[in-house]
Amino acid sequence: QVTLRESGPALMKPTQTLTLTCSFSGFSLTSTGMCVNWIRQPPGKALEWLAVIDWDDNEFYSPSLRTRLTISKDTSKNQVVLTMTNMDPLDTATYYCARIRGQLDDGFDVWGQGTMVTVSS
Amino acid sequence: QSVLTQPPSVSAAPGQKVTISCSGSSSNIGNNHVSWYQHLPGTAPKLLISENNKRPSGIPDRFSGSKSGTSATLGITGLQTGDEADYYCGTWDNSLNAHVFGTGTKVAVL
């Protein structure tokens, strides 16, 4: 069974750096075609893709957030970490990690439950 | 700002059919597979359709997907109250080197 679970702080202050961890099981990020993505949804707004890291260490980022994001993986721990610098109240959202198995235009077939992050002074 | 455009809402009576459009460009839908997701409040999004028209295991055949040129469509037949949710299209954009989602469509069962 494939599962993903997000963890991180629920409350942050503006200008702080957010670190989110996606812990997964049931697959290996060393297997060809495997990717883990980060996606967020601000309250009342649409889904927004943030970043992806694949089995071959390729990384891609949302153009609008590229300068603030870093994605990394620890294959020995089955974890993917996303850091976002200079947090702002507009970054208040539910953050999800999700898997792609195959090409980058294949669907996100398994999602974590999401973790809500609130940015407030 | 989403690069894929969807209607804000669609509605129909139980048992009827709705279709949701997703309009993009040659850099995304025109040259890549489209996926569709159902998002119920308080839950994780669920993959309904991948690779334009493939249903993952467990997704009923009431849900269907198609693609033509730079647009894609999700169809839901035999509408049920449990289908009330937000629906999103998504694909890869070769110019942005990024995944893009649609603006989202709320389905209401009258």
Image: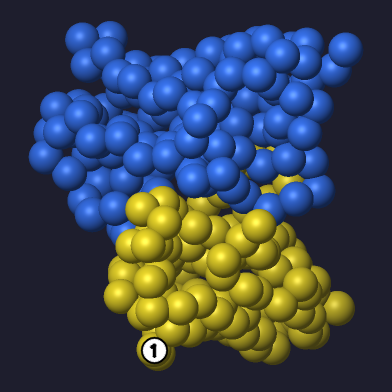
Q: Say if residue A111 shows up in the picture.
A: no
Say which residue label 1 marks.
B69
- Give the position of the N terminus of chain A as an image quadrant: top left
Residue B58 vs residue A60, the one in the foreground: A60
Between A75 and A61, the one lying in front of the other is A61
Q: Is residue A104 left or right of residue A65?
A: left
Relative to residue A37, is residue B63 depicted above or below? below
Q: Which chain is blue?
A: A
Identity of the residue drawn at 60% across and 39% down? A40
Q: Residue at x 61, y 61 (%)?
A: B2
Q: Position of residue A57 (x, y in %)?
A: 20, 29
Q: Is residue B35 rendered to the left or right of residue A14? A: left
- Mark 1 residue element: loop
What scheme was used to colour the molecule? Answer: by chain
- Residue located at (48% from left, 62% from top): B90
Q: Position of residue A107 (x, y in %)?
A: 37, 56
Residue A110 visible in the shown view = yes
Chain letter of the residue beneath label 1 in the structure image: B
Q: Colour of chain B?
A: yellow
Q: Nearer the viewer, residue A78 or A121?
A: A121
**How dense is the environment of label 1, judged by Cα within 10 Å: few (below 14), some, or many (20 and up)?**
few
Residue A41 quadrant: top right
Residue at (59% x, 18% y) in the render: A85
Left or right: residue A65 compared with residue B17:
left
Quadrant of the rendered image containing residue A8: top right
Q: Is residue B99 above or below residue A7?
A: below
Residue B21 placed where, x, y %? Answer: 59, 82
